[in-house]
Amino acid sequence: MKSESNNITNNNNDDFTEKRLQLVKSLQRKGIRDEKVLRAMSELPRELFVSPAFFHRAYEDSALPLSDRQTISQPYTVAYMTSLLNVRKGDKILEIGTGSGYQAALLNLMGADVYSVERIAGLQKQAMKIFDMLEMNITLNVGDGTIGWEEFAPYDGIIITAGAPHIPNQLRGQLNINGRMVVPVGNKESQSMYVIIRISNKEYSTEKRHKFKFVPLIGKDGWS
Ligand code: SAM
């Protein structure tokens, strides 16, 4: 299920449709303007990606716990980062930190060709089950995403959904020319969102945006 126009909730007799639309309206009020992001979020069933104990809170605009002390990110954060990524249909996108799989599924729904790396095997397995159920073709790997995924590089976009101590160098090198990377960078308490654009083989532009709080990016070129 890869096309931008797919509506995966249409035939569902979906109790959550109204809640999903309310969430999208609240994101608009908070300043999210990207129509493609808002449309995809109004279709993607977030309740499938949260732990069963938090099912009833799936449409709160808040991060929720997953297993292994990880989290599914707050919808506002997902919308904000995805807007910054400027995704076009057919883009090849690498995500670091599959977690629940929600972010990867959203990118897939927007028409991207998605690759995603997760360091915790149990989370990857659970995400894979949901992608299979939604018939989404997303390429997954278990490993240390701080070194990227060279095999499928270069990428039109890279999104890192865990907080990094600095901009991971190898990941930067796996961007296409004009490709962009969205990454939260800072200490363990708070991170600023950075947008890095590869201008040429050796040149990158860097913009610093709003502050967020993520679980740490752990690995060779992240936190130990
Ligand atoms: N994108 C996820 C979603 O949609 O649910 C949320 C991700 S959660 C905030 C951050 C994830 O990054 C966690 O699942 C964590 O295990 C993972 N992570 C941390 N360091 C990593 C690394 N070096 N490589 C891959 N994944 C990593």
Image: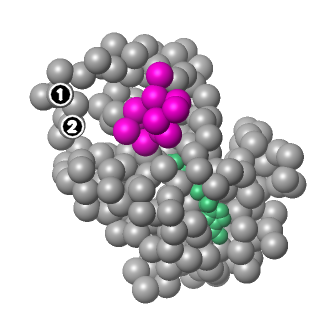
Disc 1 on helix, strand or loop? loop
Q: Nearer the viewer, mark 1 or mark 2?
A: 1
| Quadrant location, the C terminus | bottom right
Residue designated by label 2: 8
Q: Which mark is residue 12?
A: 1
Name the residue type under label 2: Ile
Nearest the camera: 207 or 72?
Answer: 72
> Which of the 4 quarters of the picture holds residue 185?
bottom right
Which residue occupies 56% across, 60% down? 97
Identify residue type, mark 1.
Answer: Asn
- Residue nearer the viewer, 198 or 43: 43
Asked whether, in this view, residue 109 is left or right of residue 200, the answer is: left
| Residue neighbourhood size for the residue with mark 2, other residues' Cα within 10 Å, grouped as few (<14), some (14–19), many (≥20) | some
Q: Is residue 71 magenta?
A: no
- Residue 55 in magenta stretch: yes
Q: How many marks?
A: 2
Category of crowding for the residue at label 1, using alpha-carbon neighbours closer than 10 angstroms: few (below 14), some (14–19), many (at least 20): few
- 95 above or below 133? below
Q: Position of residue 216 (x, y in %)?
A: 74, 58
The residues bearing labels 1 and 2 have C-alpha atoms spaced at a distance of 8 Å
Q: Quadrant of ligand 1?
A: bottom right
- Does the Cβ of the disc 1 residue fall within 8 Å of ligand 1? no
| Rendering coords of residue 140 (x, y %) | 40, 69
Q: Which residues are magenta?
A: 46-56
Task: Determine the residue positioned at 72% across, 68% down.
Answer: 218
| Left or right: residue 131 compared with residue 175 | left
Label for residue 155? none
Q: Are marks 1 and 2 in contact (CB under 8 Å)?
A: yes
The reply to whether residue 144 is visible in this rendering is yes
